[in-house]
Image (tube, rainbow, N blue to C red):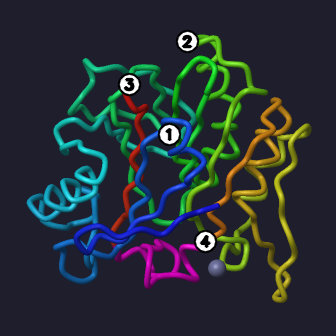
Amino acid sequence: MLQENEQAGVRYFTFPDLTAMGVDHVIGTRQGGVSPAPFASLNVSMSVGDAAENVRQNRARLGQIVGVTPEDMVTAWLVHGNDVAPVNGAHRGQRIPYHDALVTNEPEVPLFMTFADCVPIILFDPVHRAVGLIHAGWRGTAAGIVPRTVQVMHQCFQTRPQDLVLAFGPAIGRCHYEVGPEVLQAFQHLVRTPAVFEPADNGKVRLDLVATNQQQAEIVGIQRFLFARLCTACRTDLFYSHRAEQGRTGRFGVLVKLRDA
Ligand SMILES: [Zn+2]
């Protein structure tokens, strides 16, 4: 389901099913960039203390895989909310403030976000040719960011949930995601879409972010899912993990765009 690739030393993943449907995308790793420790080496976040020139170079390396430059990318100032921004070619090179989801139906407008444990989610509507990129941490998940994005795609592009393909990128797995009472509390209002928790050995609980988002997606009618099934905290050789690396680390990038037909 997930394919591992390498280009000029840059290691990255793709979903061949999405590529075949005309969705260009790159799920970056931490391998093949220019940043020093603790950001080694393919860090694409400007907000972690890494040098801007390194980040630019790393973004250029990722973009090159699908023929785009950092100046083409539409990025978002991620705030763990559930706001969704519809964007188009006029937004190239912009960082959209306070949004954790970007959607577009314009070909060759690359959506780009940075991750280290939170769930990267790609949405694709093959009928109306529209795409979305979501950053879903526990706060965004508790705020229903997937159903919210589906709603905005419906308003903007007439997207029907039953047509959507939803792909889950690498994220912290339930194996590593012990959570506290504030997280449990945040999900209490979700009567129709309970979160997927499991008890841990020490009396605490673990949250399954991917399964919780899948459940929310199924309730609004999404039927087609693709899974990376890679835990960022298990695989710090491949990915950055905010949790496993105690916050001192970089971010890997996820880029998605509709290929011009
Ligand atoms: Zn794990």
Dot 3 falls on a residue whose secondary structure is: loop
Residue 75 lies, in percent from the top left, at 32, 39
Dot 1 falls on a residue whose secondary structure is: strand
Q: Which mark is residue 133?
A: 1
* Label 2 packing within 10 angstroms: few (<14), some (14-19), many (20+): some
Number of disc labels? 4
**Residue range corresponding to the magenta coloring:** 231-249
Residue 33 lies, in percent from the top left, at 22, 71
Which residue was labeled with disc 2? 156
**Contact, mark 3 vs mark 2 (Cβ under 8 Å):** no
Q: Amino acid at mark 3?
A: Pro
Label 4 lies in ligand 1 vicinity (Cβ under 8 Å)? no
Whether the magenta-drawn stretch holds residue 246 is answered as yes
**Contact, mark 2 vs mark 1 (Cβ under 8 Å):** no
Q: Nearer the viewer, mark 1 or mark 3?
A: 3
Looking at the rendering, in which quadrant would you find the C terminus? top left
What residue do we see at 40% from left, 66% from top? 12
Q: CA distance from mark 2 to mark 1?
A: 15 Å
Q: Amino acid at mark 4?
A: Leu
* Label 1 packing within 10 angstroms: few (<14), some (14-19), many (20+): many
* Label 4 packing within 10 angstroms: few (<14), some (14-19), many (20+): some
Q: Amino acid at mark 1?
A: Leu
Which residue was labeled with disc 3? 107
Residue 173 lies, in percent from the top left, at 67, 71
Which residue was labeled with disc 4? 230
Q: Amino acid at mark 2?
A: Cys
Q: Magenta residues: mostly which secondary structure?
A: loop
Indicate which disc, 3 or 2, sits on the residue closer to the N terminus. Answer: 3
Q: CA distance from mark 3 to mark 2?
A: 15 Å
Whether the magenta-drawn stretch holds residue 185 is answered as no
**Contact, mark 3 vs mark 4 (Cβ under 8 Å):** no
Q: CA distance from mark 4 to mark 1?
A: 18 Å
